[in-house]
Amino acid sequence: MLDSFWIFPALFATGFIAGLIDSISGGGGLLTLPVLLGIGLPPHVALGTNKFQSTFGSFTSTYYYRRHKVVKIREAIKGIIYTAIGTVIGTWSVQQIHPEFLGHLIPWLLLTIAIYTIFSPKLGTADQRAKLTPNVFYFLFGLLFGFYDGFFGPGVGSFWAIAFVLLMGFNLTKATGYTKAMNFTSNIVSAVVFIIGGKVIYAIGLVMAAGQIFGSIVGARLVVKKGAKLIRPVFITIVILTTIKLLYQNYW
């Protein structure tokens, strides 16, 4: 299948759609990873190539959100540092411990997030009072979610977004912007580890990365213009789809 000419336009389109989804709510890996496995890549190579190409999308989204003052990198720098540390620890740990326990736990946590969001219609529509200081928040959740993304990964964008809304008092647009900054951090750290391990196919990764860049720009523009009205339904849909995928994967 890799020898087919049409595989590259299909990979570009996959990257575009994933970048669009990722920049709005996260969850683009639901599309890209099955496609990479479907074209015959071994699992570790598929994971490495997926992290490599998704790095371009998360960087593009972060850059766009920063330009439009949704994200202030100086305010997020401690979160970026702690997330990077957590990702390194998580990426190392997954090679020592099988992530089966997390595989069974995470879908139920995601389902809880989806239900809570559905029954809280005003969640993230406006800024609220923060419940934690930035230092405490980034220390705790940077290490925790960075570790989780390096160790297992699915749904990490949803966890970041809901944490920003509930504990830092961000509206959904701002939470999405800061989530992409954290996603880019954990993506690039994981990608570097996979590159060192020789688990990336660059021809495939770069074609998908081009699609990711264009999709991320379109998605980020929509978020800046539409805000919570756009993010909320996409966020709920992606969380539910991620939950279904993980439940099916772990129990059936």
Image (tube, grey):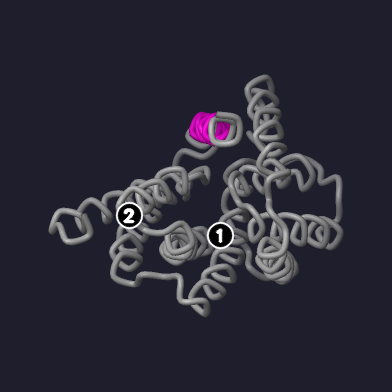
Please tell me which residue is depicted at 86% across the width and 56% down the height of the picture.
Answer: 133
Residue 198 in sight from this viewpoint:
yes
Q: Residue 25: x and y, percent?
A: 52, 43
Q: Quadrant of residue 140?
A: bottom right
| Furthest residue in direction top, as rendered | 119
Q: Quadrant of the N terminus?
A: bottom left
Q: Position of residue 194 (x, y in %)?
A: 52, 71
Q: Is residue 54 above or below residue 230?
A: below
The picture places residue 173, in percent across and down from the top left corner, at 57, 45
Is residue 9 found left or right of 247 in the rendered image? left
Magenta portion: prevailing SS class: helix
Judging by the rendered image, the residue that carries numbered circle 1 is 69
**Based on the displayed image, in which of its 4 quarters is residue 146 positioned?**
bottom right
State whether residue 33 is above or below residue 127.
below
Label 1 CA crowd tier, 10 Å (few <14, some 14–19, many 20+): few
SS assignment at label 1: loop
Decide which of tag 1 and tag 2 comes sooner along the chain.
Answer: 2
Q: Amino acid at mark 2?
A: Gly
Label 2 sits on a secondary structure element that is loop
* Residue drawn where x is 67% and y is 61% of the image: 94
In contact (CB < 8 Å): disc 1 and disc 2:
no
Report the amino acid beneath label 1.
Lys
* Magenta run includes residue 238: yes
Residue 35 pos. (x, y %) = 35, 48
Q: Which mark is residue 40?
A: 2
Residue at position x 45%, y 47% in the image: 28
Q: Tell me the magenta residue range.
A: 233-245
